Image (cartoon, rainbow, N blue to C red):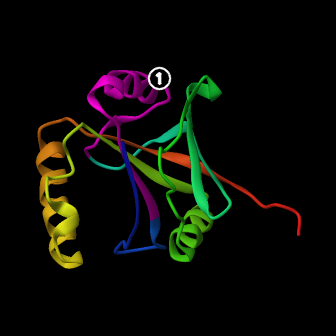
Amino acid sequence: MVWALAVREVAEGSRFAELIVEVGAELHADLVEAAVDSGFVLAAGEPPATSGVVEVGGGRVERLVLVGGREVWEPDTRVEVSPGWLAAALGRGVAVVVLVPPGTWPPGLIELEPEKRLDAFTRHLEQERTAGRVLHGMASVQVDHPER
């Protein structure tokens, strides 16, 4: 299971927060079904609004909630939220969630230099998107602000 965050620049308007999620082959069909039931579509054109919710707390992504709360997906490792990602998410009130098939992260990606890593992943993601294997949608972002 791989969860990653990105902040995307746009030609017009404010930046947007992106959450990229890949689960293992044994869970992928369940995630796709829940995502489609929540309004996610094949990643072509603008991502639609969905009933999905990205819950953030303690400086990290805690979970992705789908199908009106009936499906809850949690990362198996800490997914730290950067100040820039959080600002973009709160600025728009949503994050674009991209659901990718197993194997989208190319082998050896982590060993590459950051710039080459981004290029390699972007190329591979575009291949998966073109092949019709990537879903996307806009999910609201809820941040737990503990009392201080």
Question: Mark 1 — residue?
Answer: 37
Q: Which residues are magenta?
A: 17-44
Which one is in front, 6 or 59? 59
Q: Residue at x 53, y 46 (%)?
A: 139
Q: Secondary structure at mark 1?
A: helix
Where in the figure is residue 97, as x and y percent of width and height? 43, 48
Q: Which of the 4 quarters of the picture holds residue 111?
A: bottom left
Q: Is residue 78 placed above or below 25 in the rendered structure?
A: below
Q: Residue at x 51, y 38 (%)?
A: 50
Total numbered circles: 1
Q: Give the side of residue 108 with respect to residue 50, left or right.
A: left
Q: Give the side of residue 126 with respect to residue 77, left or right.
A: left
Where in the figure is residue 47, as x and y percent of width and height? 39, 47
Q: Residue at x 51, y 69 (%)?
A: 85
Asked if the stretch drawn in magenta spans residue 95, the answer is no
Q: Please, which residue is most extreme toward the right here?
A: 148
How many C-alpha atoms fall within 10 Å of the one at disc 1: few (<14), some, or many (≥20)? some
Q: Quadrant of the N terminus?
A: top left
